[in-house]
Amino acid sequence: MTTQTRLLTVADVQALQTISIETFTDTFAAQNTAANMRAYLDEAYNLPTLTAELETTDTRFYFVERDHEPLGYLKLNVNEAQSEKMGPDALEIERIYIRPAFKHQGLGSAFIKQAIELAKQAHKTKVWLGVWEHNEPAKAFYAKWGFQQFGAHTFTMGDDPQTDLLMSRPV
């Protein structure tokens, strides 16, 4: 079975919506109310929003697939598409999500390597991301890859303001 990464197009919007809802729910449902989860999922992962993001010049989505089955996805932003103004020298990893059955198989690491390589090709000097302050496995994963905290911002989940730690690493 061959695993490959593929750049998404607008034609992939429904598959992206499905995997986005599945993986976000798997990652955060246990720590958040059902109402806040529903509000966030309805806002962030509706088809018009995802279509607009797929059409944004400075945003790229990738699936990692095995036999044409999506196992996880990556969302990258540069320039004005970044969720925080980090300047033209930065690449943002906005989302890395792996479906539950495929975690701990090196797919997240492959996405980090891909993001760093794309940042190099685009002559960026740093890669950065935001991670929920209570997501200990993700924080440890990013630290293993050399990401260090440099700040924080508020991430609103429904009506619950939460703190994301901002982490970066040089390219």
Image: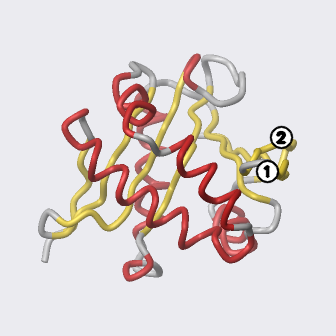
Classify residue 12 as left or right of residue 86: left
Kindly indicate whether the residue at mark 1 contacts the one at mark 2 (C-beta within 8 angstroms): yes
Classify residue 81 by image quadrant.
top right
Residue at (76, 45) in percent of width and height: 156
What is the count of numbered marks? 2
Residue at (34, 50) in percent of width and height: 16
- In the picture, the quarter occupied by the N terminus is bottom left
Residue 165 in the image, given as x and y percentages of width and height:
81, 51
Q: CA distance from mark 2 to mark 1?
A: 5 Å
Residue 110 in the image, given as x and y percentages of width and height:
41, 61
Residue 27 in the image, given as x and y percentages of width and height:
59, 70
Give the label on residue 153, or none.
2
Classify residue 46 as left or right of residue 135: left
Q: Which residue is mark 1?
A: 164
Residue 46 in the image, given as x and y percentages of width and height:
44, 41
User: Tag 1: residue type?
Assistant: Asp
Classify residue 67 as left or right of residue 156: left
Badge 2, how many Cα within 10 Å: few under 14, some, many 20+?
some
- In the picture, the quarter occupied by the C terminus is top right
Badge 1, how many Cα within 10 Å: few under 14, some, many 20+?
some
Which callout, 2 or 1, points at the residue further toward the start of the chain? 2
Badge 1 marks a residue whose secondary structure is: strand
Residue at (66, 67) in percent of width and height: 34
Front residue of 65 and 149: 65
Front residue of 119 and 54: 54
- Whether residue 114 is situated above or below residue 58 in the rendered picture: below
- Whether residue 101 is situated above or below residue 27 in the rendered picture: below
